[in-house]
Amino acid sequence: MSGGRGRGRGRKRRGGATESHNDERWMASYMDMVTVLMCMFIVLFAMSSVDNEKFVQLRDSLATGFGQVEVGKIDTAKGVVVAPADVGKEGTMTEDYMAVARAEADKLTALREDMHTRLVSAGLDGNVEFGIDQRGLTVKLVGSQTFFYPDSPALSDTALQVLTAVAPVLDAAHLEISVEGHAANAITNYPSVWELSSERAVGVLRYLVEQRGIAATRIGAVGYGSARQVNDDSTEPLRELNRRVDIVVLSNQSEEVRALIPEALKEKAAHP
């Protein structure tokens, strides 16, 4: 009886050690195989939904990073991958942004000169001011007595002639346009100067869209009232300078590039 109870629990070797069975070793190999299969299906799924353009960019970026091929700078999403020779050099990206800012400043300057030439031909150059900054190119219609009837959003004949002259340049630029109305802090028949400045901006917008063919999808109007004055309201001539409508041709460059446009303009002025 005592011999029967010992069966199934393993035999004892000399020295008292128990010999274990290896019947469960197959489970380790099975688990490894399942893991490999799962990884393979994950890779297959990822490959089936890959963005081909981004895959090519990633491939070229990795190849450039390891020095296998030279493909220059690669734009992947929002970052910039530089060539291996430029890795570690300070200011590389800033120099790239500055180069783009110089080109953008040249483009905005060309738009301004084109508008100015058209205004000179029409004898209207004395009625318009221009400005270029990090937002873009601003065409300033300054003075309500020149461009609008007193305390009214109705466009004067001079305003219509100016808008007709600059509209072809605005249209050809294919950039976003912001029409911004401003008013002096003075008495008006309107409920407030907000309504007056807004209606004047909308009047300019409607003429550009409805009469000059500017695409409505890339132009908007806003009224600032007297919140963004360029002078105080101590005298009537100063108040008249605050009554204006700005047509802003907005730069479509990144924020980093636009911030460098004023510096690029200074360089251009110093080395014409």
Image (cartoon, rainbow, N blue to C red):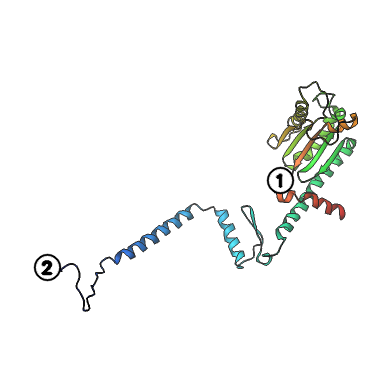
The residue where tag 2 is placed is: 4
Callout in the foreground (1, 2)? 2
Quadrant holding the N terminus: bottom left
Please state the horizontal and vertical placement of residue 209, each as a whole percent of the image.
Answer: 73, 32
Q: Element type at marker 2? A: helix
Q: Quadrant of residue 99?
A: bottom right
The residue where tag 1 is placed is: 252
Q: Element type at marker 1? A: loop
Q: Residue visible at 73% across and 51% down? A: 257
**Residue lying farthest to the bottom in this orientation:** 14
- Regarding residue 167, the answer to whether it shows in the image is no
Identify the mark at residue 126; answer none if there is no mark: none
Q: Residue visible at 74% across and 45% down? A: 251
- In the image, 20: left or right of 174? left
Please state the horizontal and vertical placement of residue 235, each as a whole percent of the image.
Answer: 90, 30
Q: Callout 2, which amino acid?
A: Gly
Which tag, 1 or 2, sits closer to the chain's start?
2
Q: Residue visible at 86% across and 37% down? A: 128
Please state the horizontal and vertical placement of residue 216, each as a whole percent of the image.
Answer: 70, 34
Q: Nearer the viewer, residue 30 or 64?
A: 30
Q: Callout 1, which amino acid?
A: Asn
Quadrant holding the C terminus: bottom right
- Regarding residue 92, the answer to whether it shows in the image is yes
**Residue lying farthest to the top in this orientation:** 189
Position above or below: 86 against 241: below
